[in-house]
Image (cartoon, rainbow, N blue to C red):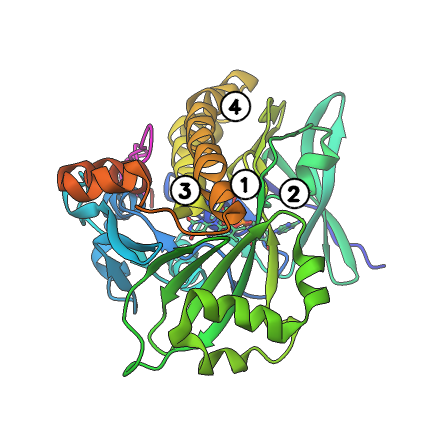
Amino acid sequence: MADVTPLTTQCCIAGGGPAGLMLGFLLARAGVDVIVLEKHKDFLRDFRGDTIHPSTLTILQDLGLLEEFLKLPHDEISELSGDVYGTVVTLADFRHVPAPRPFLVLVPQWDFLDFIADHARRLPRFHLLMETKAERVVEENGRIVGVEVSQGERRFRIACDLLVAADGRHTTIRESAGLQVNDIGAPIDVLWFRVPRDAERHPSRTGGILRPGAMLVMLDRSSYWQCAFVIPKGSMDKLQAEGLQRFRERIAAVAPFLTPELQALASWDDIKLLGVQITDLPHWSRPGLLCIGDAAHAMSPVGGVGINLAIQDAVAAANLLADPLREGRLTTHDLERVQKRRRWAARVTQRAQVAVQDEVLSPVLARQDAPQAPPLAVRMLQRFPRLRRLPARLVGIGVRPERVETGPAHG
Ligand SMILES: Cc1cc2nc3c(=O)[nH]c(=O)nc-3n(C[C@H](O)[C@H](O)[C@H](O)COP(=O)(O)OP(=O)(O)OC[C@H]3O[C@@H](n4cnc5c(N)ncnc54)[C@H](O)[C@@H]3O)c2cc1C
């Protein structure tokens, strides 16, 4: 295995997801030398979070990038609706959220990441190493002083003042630093798959369909539906044992208009299991190391808030760390301030997700027959439309929203 000369930087970020790329961009923009490591050769991620919320649109506006971002092909969602046991209801109304644009943007995650990476690459202090895997932390006298990385057969070290673990929920860096996570657990898993969309026959509606024992979320992607089928945790083996035709029938029972298109599911390879996890990290940092995004708090897909929380972490970290990093005076206390600011927001959001999982999703999956009427909360939202602003605010803006405070771009 060939070795190359070690590199040195002020901040090395493991992971080029929403958290890592946004933090790299913000720090480089604030004059900090940054290397971002991404183990894949591109940002193509199928079946991951694709929703950009008003809170993130606010960040893009702070950066002067909002108008350009909105030129990317995307869909705008002003209302979230659902079909609850046969009654179509509106659950959230984003038109009143305090943001430069009051809607959710549906855009493939890779387009969003490419967009941020393109802008970051224009900054002289930003360096993105693709197909480069962060293997483990390098530690000296109890302090993380760098990271060991691999590029194919090559292995080398990057020395840094700060290593950031933004390598997602299956983080290797957090593990190698010995930081222990609490698994809060989740009663559901999600199966993702695509089904062709017949524009003439299919209603154009992004939303969920609830039926006794089943929940299907459908994202309208013009030529196809991106579908998420919620199942009880650990039940994938049972579904597979029943066979693919039975699975198609289960989906068709929820969305009969999809029946012909479901033949496009030719094998189980077309269906991707995503095991839902909710985790909480009691200590986000060690001297020289900080965890953010899913590496610090894996989120349930409920509300589709994961990308946006990861970005909020990145903005808070940049606001608090850019000056000390640039001036070479970073302390452990600075890192702890990031956790202090963001862990509360993540925990509050996770608690809301757990409540939805336990009070809504699990009972729906356990039901044998439809109730006489939609649940009380849903009926209230129909009777008092102003109430729909509350879920919109929780999902679209969240708790403790961040603004970019790192000032204008450094030359
Ligand atoms: C089923 C499902 C549906 C979801 N739907 C939504 C949604 O609709 N909206 C939403 O906002 N969120 C959603 N989420 C959550 C969202 O995808 C995550 O919360 C978000 O992507 C977290 O961002 P991150 O940057 O922390 O981590 P990730 O997005 O996981 O990014 C980590 C990056 O690090 C790279 N990496 C990993 N290990 C290494 C390594 N050792 N070295 C170098 N690179 C490495 C990975 O390739 C990846 O690019 C969903 C999640 C799931 C599981």
Write down the residue under mark 4.
Answer: 335
Which amino acid, mark 1? Asp
Q: Position of residue 252 (x, y in %)?
A: 47, 71
Kindly tell me whether mark 2's CB lies below 8 Å from ligand 1: yes
Badge 4 density bin: few <14, some 14–19, many ≥20, Cα 10 Å: many
Instruction: Assess whether mark 4 and mark 2 are in contact (beta carbons under 8 angstroms).
Output: no
Image quadrant where residue 85 sits: bottom left
Q: Which mark lies nearer to you, 3 or 1?
A: 1
Q: Disc 1 or 2, which lies upstream in sequence?
A: 2
Residues under labels 4 and 1: Cα distance? Answer: 17 Å
Write down the residue under mark 3.
Answer: 311
- Left or right: residue 188 compared with residue 310: right
Which amino acid, mark 2? Thr
Which amino acid, mark 3? Ile
Write down the residue under mark 2.
Answer: 171
Q: Position of residue 234 (x, y in %)?
A: 67, 49
Badge 1 density bin: few <14, some 14–19, many ≥20, Cα 10 Å: many
Q: Position of residue 42 (x, y in %)?
A: 55, 65
Residues under labels 4 and 3: Cα distance? Answer: 17 Å
Q: Disc 2 or 3, which lies upstream in sequence?
A: 2
Badge 3 density bin: few <14, some 14–19, many ≥20, Cα 10 Å: many
Query: At 51% from the left edge and 59% from the top edge, which residue is drawn?
Result: 229
